[in-house]
Structures are given as C-alpha cells and as structure tokens.
Amino acid sequence: MQPHTGSYYAATVNEVTDYAPLQGDQQADVCVIGAGFTGIATALTLAERGYSVRVLEANKVGWGASGRNGGQMIGGIAGEKHLRKVCDADMLWQMHWRGHDIIAERVEKYGIHCDLKYGYVDVAIKPRHLRDFQEEFDYLESHGFEYEHRMLDRDETREMIGTSAYLGALLNMRNGHLHPLNLCIGEARAATGLGVSIHEGSEVLRIEHGARPKVVTAEGSVIADSVVIAGNAYHLVEPKLRGIMFPVNSFIIATEPLTENQVASVNPHDLAICDPNFVLQYYRLSADKRFLFGARINTFGDDPAYIAKHHLPLLLRLYPQLEGIGVDYAWGGTIGVPLHRVPRIGRVAPNVFYSQGYSGHGVNVTHLAGEIMADTIAGTLERFDVFAGIKSTRFPGSHTFRKPLVALGVLYHQIRDKL
C-alpha cells in the first residue's frame, strides 16, 4: 500500500479552516504576514491585549512547518551559546521555557485539543553527546529545575525507549509532544474569537513602507500602524530578509497503528525522542499509537513513496522488532536555519518587524517570539533587543540557488555528524 499524499496531521485535524481571502482596502493596528505558529501566536497575544489585528496567509493556517513538524515541544533556543554572551542569565532561563508556559496556558484557557503530553529524551550516539547532555543536566540543576530529569546509561535508555542503539540519554519531563496543526488551528480559532481577522489564500505581493505601512495582496490591502513578517522559511515578500538563513527540508512518516505489545516494546512511556545530530532523527507516538519518525533527506522532493522508502529502513535499524510494519503517511516541511542557529528577530523598518529561523525548535520558540513581537509593538524592547543585536550572516545566492546549496549543506553536516 502506498502512503497517503498529505500529512498525518492534516488527516486528523480537528477542523478544516476556511477563512475568506482579503478583499478591498482594510485597516488594523497590526498586520501579521503568515498564519503559522509565529503569526498566530503574535496575533493572539496582541488580541489579548486589545489590539486590532489582521493576519494574511498565502495558503492555510498552519500550512507550512507549523502544521507539518514532528510535534516535539523542546525547551531552549537554538544557538543559545551565542545568546549567553549578550543576555542576562535569568532572562535567558525564563525564555528557555516561556513557550512551554504559553502553550500550556492556551491549551487550558481556550480548550484546545492537541494531544499535549509531557516526556522527552535526548539520546546519545557518541561520547561527546553524553558530555553535552551532562552540561545540560548541570544547567538544569543549577537553576533548581523542579521537573523530573536524569541522565540514563545505556541499559536504562534501552529499558526506557526499547532500543539498544544509544550510549545513554537525558530524560526531561518538562518537554513533551503534541499535534502541532491542531494547536495552531486552535490558537487561530481563539484569536478570531477575540476579534482577529484571518485571511487565507491571501499572498502578500509587497509592503509599501511609510508612517503607516501598506500590505498589498492581489485583491486587497491592509494599512496598519505596525507589520509583523512571520514567514519563517517562506520569506519571499521582503528582499532584505533573503539570504539570512537556509531553508531546510525535513520529512516524516507515520506508520499504521501499533499493537499494545508493539507500543510496550518500542515506547512504553510515550516519550518524544531526538538525537543531537544536525541531520537528526526524531520520533514519537501519535495519540492513536502510530510511530511518527522524522529525518532530513538530501533532496527537495516530496514523493510519499520515496520518503517512506528512505525512512522505514532507518526506523527498523533502531527498532527491528517492527519489521513488517506498514507506512500510512509520508510528508515533508521546510524550516529556516540561520548560520549561527539563533532565531532571526529584528526589523526592516521602524514599524516593520520580523521573526523567523528557529532551527527545529519552533514549537516552543515561536510562542516566545509571538510574545516578544507583541511586547515590541507595545514599546517594550528588552528581549527583542537581545536577538536584534546579533548580526545576521548572509548566504550569498542562497535564495536563487537554495536547492544545490542546501544539498551541499546537508552533506557537510552528515560528514560532521559522523566525526
């Protein structure tokens, strides 16, 4: 049986959105470009504070990586070692977990059904990974981390997650996993309930800068006091943002549902699992007990049969006890990765801001970013300035030649991962 075209998340969404395209000339306090996690989190935070907001989305809510990712809610910010040089330690610790807090609060407040569950394991392939995990464990200890966390040796890791492939691991019960598309759509529904206007099928053609910028689509426009660009890897509207990060594809398969015995064999504690490589593997169980397995491929194709053919052997190498399992879904998505991995948060004009480039930590950090964007528009720039002060490194030609450059980049990191 061939895998379905389209993601498992799209097939199991709580509701299918149908927001009308933008028509005519409109106004708002803030216009947000992009209805993924960053855009929706920003819009909802602003609406909770009384701002009028219009969100413009070229496709559907959560269409990009926000609705296609592994659903792993991981604390911390990519490139944090750079942030530690310029950020107050207490502020950085608070930001490390702030996205988790926002997600939990909104799931509870707005009754969002997104299968939120806690429990996560970083797994070590090499001795240097264990050293890195020990540093992270010590960092947690130094802050009196109140949630269960502990280093696991090889035997404990095998008992915890059902595979002998790893040297050890770090368990963290503050991290977890969820259905990302249902979370994004649930937050969008909460935002519209507070007066936010969301317009799907409304690709932004240009931004006309000025005292009140004008955001133009094919059939309308929005004049606003402020604009937030939340396109992440799809940052085509603003030329100044091209080349500040690589768009990188990651692909996932969802198997057929596992039996109770299979679940007990591979993931009895229902944990999210991830290795620390750049060309990484990450996996977990869905709410209906499918094995969701993700990895990066040195390709830009999205053929489900090809993805399944590539991923299933990787899964079976870790869990040979699943030999014969079928793959029902296979899909991909694009994430943004800056060279130094620090999220790119800044402005292209005094009243036009952007936030993107989360390097695979998007579930958590996008929600932090939404709050930072809202704070910035309100005039509180303390956290914004931390990120904006880190200079972007541009990739010459990355916008025009992104496919061959990304292929070379993935190959480079595959070699580094093996060292």
Image: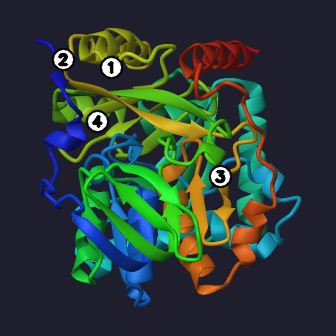
Which secondary structure, mark 1? loop
Residue type at mark 2? Answer: Gly
- Where does the N terminus fall, quadrant-wise? top left
The residue located at (57%, 22%) in the rendering is 402
- Residue 174 visible here: no
Q: Nearer the viewer, residue 83 or 354?
A: 354
Q: Nearer the viewer, residue 127 or 359?
A: 359
Identify the residue under disc 4. Answer: 264
Residue type at mark 1? Answer: Asp
Identify the residue under disc 3. Answer: 343
Q: Position of residue 167 (x, y in %)?
A: 64, 27
Give the colour scheme of this rendering. rainbow
Identify the residue under disc 2. Answer: 326
The residue located at (43%, 12%) in the rendering is 317
Residue type at mark 3? Answer: Pro
Disc 2 vs disc 4: which is toward the camera? Answer: 2
Mark 2 or mark 4: whose residue is earlier in sequence: 4
Q: CA distance from mark 3 to mark 2?
A: 37 Å
What number is the disc on residue 302? 1
Mark 3 or mark 1: whose residue is earlier in sequence: 1
Q: CA distance from mark 2 to mark 4?
A: 18 Å
Mark 4 or mark 3: whose residue is earlier in sequence: 4
Determine which quarter of the picture holds residue 122.
top right
Q: Farthest right residue?
A: 85
Q: Position of residue 247 (x, y in %)?
A: 54, 32
Q: CA distance from mark 1 to mark 2?
A: 19 Å
